[in-house]
Amino acid sequence: MRIPATLTMVLVLITSILGDDVRDFRIPEIPAEPFLQNAPTEAMADRLHAVTLFGKARFEQRRGQFPDALQLYQRAWRYDRSVVSISNELIPLAMGLKRTDEAGRYAGLAIEDNSLNSQELMRLAVVLGRSGNFDKAVQAYQMILKRENDSSLPVPKALILAELGRTALLAQKNELAASAFDKVNEALKTPDQAGLTPVHITQLKGTTGAVFLAMNQAYQSTRQFKKARAAIERANQAAPNPAMHSYRMARLVLSEEKYDEAQSSLQQYFDSKSLEAKSDPYQLLINIHRNQSANPDKAVALSLEQLQKIHQSQISNHYLGYTLAELALKAGQPELSLLRLRQLLPLQPVLSGYQTATDALLAQHSNKQPITDSAAMELIWLLGTIYSRSRSLASLQQDRLTQITSDDLLLRRLAKVAFTYVDNDQIPENTNVSLKTFTSHTAAAMALLFSQKKDWQQAEKFFKLAIEEAPGQSGAFYETWGIQLLMNDERTPAIEVFETALKDEFVRNKPAIHYLISGAYLLEDQNGKAIESAKFAADQANNNPRLLSRYPWVLYHTGQWQEAKDQYSQLVEKLNGLQAAPSATSLARDAKLTLSIICQRLKQPEQAVEWLEQVLDVNPEDAGALNDLGYLWADRNEHLNRALQMTRRAVSSKPSNSAYRDSLGWAYYRLGKYDKAKSELEAAQKLDDSDGVIYDHLGDTHLQLGSPLKARKMWERALELLDKEQDAKQIDLIHLKIKKLES
């Protein structure tokens, strides 16, 4: 409270008058005992720290330094949850910074707080839904609905029930969704009793009838067909759409096994020539025939006949066209399938179309009747087009690739026609050219096939052909080639490929090649070259998180701790500004964990703690960071209760992790709970019998439990397992402990 200036002057005068007589003034005695009789408990210290952090967060927020403010709020909450409100401080900041994952994590933790009012819980439920944590969102809505006479609830419960129903569907809790929608329907019957105004009812129904469509889904999944029918009718009333109404009714009556009615309703959709439901109506027709007929082949033939009739009046309907191609292949008519796909793929390509076309062409090959050269050419073009889309054939799925690479006759035929096309631009007679693609992509696809077979001689031939055909794209071909070699542990040939690439005028300045070769150099203990290439990749990275991360990673793995620390610190700063990049968050986490290890090696424990704290600021449930920080504190004999809590949570998340068990055991040891320490350390030893640190800890524990002989046995085993260079200090300490036993 500010004191007015005039009043301040009066107080000064009064004090002056009263202070004139100092004859009775005595210097107060300072008590011999300190003000605090006992040191503050760990919980008190944590709360004081949290309050300080909260104050700093407020200051940074007022300055507009929102990322810093968010981090400080997060850490304050972790030290004492009563100091910070996730709903009021953390989540608004995280959402404003577009850090939805962080907001979702904290929202999931916050709903355990029973002191939150319903409005706060609603905000949390929305955040949880947006971040994909539907189970927790359901939990939040249920908590709200259990409350009676809640004045903080800003909307009638019917609206909350509707959100619960929709979210429960997403969480695959269909019974719960149906139950919630039952209550919504009851509220709509008696809106006055439910507190629903006309505005609320409009909000509930929406302009598209989405709530009724959700009801239909919930009721169909729980086989409440009468309710589902009513929901479909109400959805159509809210947003009339005759075509979609017919399709929805067809789905419903098929669930009721009313096949003729389903076909009749579905025909109304077909007659409308609507494309709104995409390929689903045609798949529905196939399902109707499959359910009606005991003969699967007859069902397929019947579906094919009916869909071909529909296609005659809807030639440009690609949803129908792709369905027909798949169905024709199932009916044993690969040529009909290819006829459709040759028309569709050049104009409206989809992955499933390439997969179906591949299957149709492979269906024309057998030992008795090998694939023709023209069909082989089309297959190679397909593979080349798939390669051009992702520089990989993985989207074809492994079973198709294996079908090709395991058949030597087929592979030789493909290699022959591909080489003739790429090298001489010759195409077999009678080849349909609808699927034709570039010679370079065709060669690269063949190279990938031979890489799958680990025929490196043939792979090299086709990779070189691809490079010759398109020198300007040579970087991509060299990269694919080298990656294939590295994936198969062919490190020396990979280095040779990358070094050849770096002599290419189109490639020498491409950071991706330097990134890859730096890793290969490191694996071959060519550390100087690894560092040089990694630095070049980082310098030319243009804010690519993956390329930026390689230089500090190489420095770390070559043991250059100080330089690695400096570079990782710079990397974290850059990644903080690249939050939109998908890999930036995970790379930043890994960088901070590595920085913690480096700081421990450099004997900078406070900095090691800080980096782990930063990982936990972003994700307070990160098991790796919980374990590392809990162990670090236990090892330093600090924050022991917090260390115990953290290592418990780490073990709870991954009970079979021996390192986490060891950390928990060590926390118990530091707290003097030796029996519990022994139990956890023995569990860790069973999980990993080759970890010298666990045996060292077991030795210390047995000594405290009065078993020096067991202690010595454990320490001697630890000496056998520990690394003489990396663990030299720990080895010396163990020798001292054994020597003390002998004296």
Image (tube, rainbow, N blue to C red):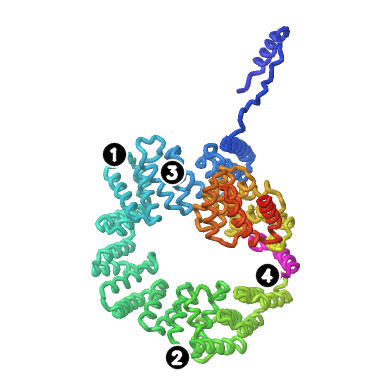
Is 251 situated left or right of 553 in this image?
left
Q: Measured from the top left, where is residue 293 in percent x and y?
A: 26, 75
Residue highlighted by disc 4 = 523
Q: Which residue is mark 2?
A: 367
Kindly indicate whether the residue at mark 4 contacts the one at mark 2 (C-beta within 8 angstroms).
no
Instruction: Label 2: state its secondary structure.
Output: loop
Q: Which residue is mark 1?
A: 193
For the N terminus, the quadrant is: top right
Give, as a three-letter code, the residue at label 3.
Met
Residue 619 horizontal/vertical position (percent)? 55, 50
Q: Main secondary structure of the magenta part?
A: helix
Label 1 near label 4: C-beta < 8 Å? Answer: no
Q: Residue at x 48, y 44 (%)?
A: 110
Where does the magenta region start and end? 524-550
Query: In this orientation, which residue lies closer to the viewer: 383 or 27?
Result: 27
Q: Which residue is mark 3?
A: 122
The answer to whether residue 94 is visible is no
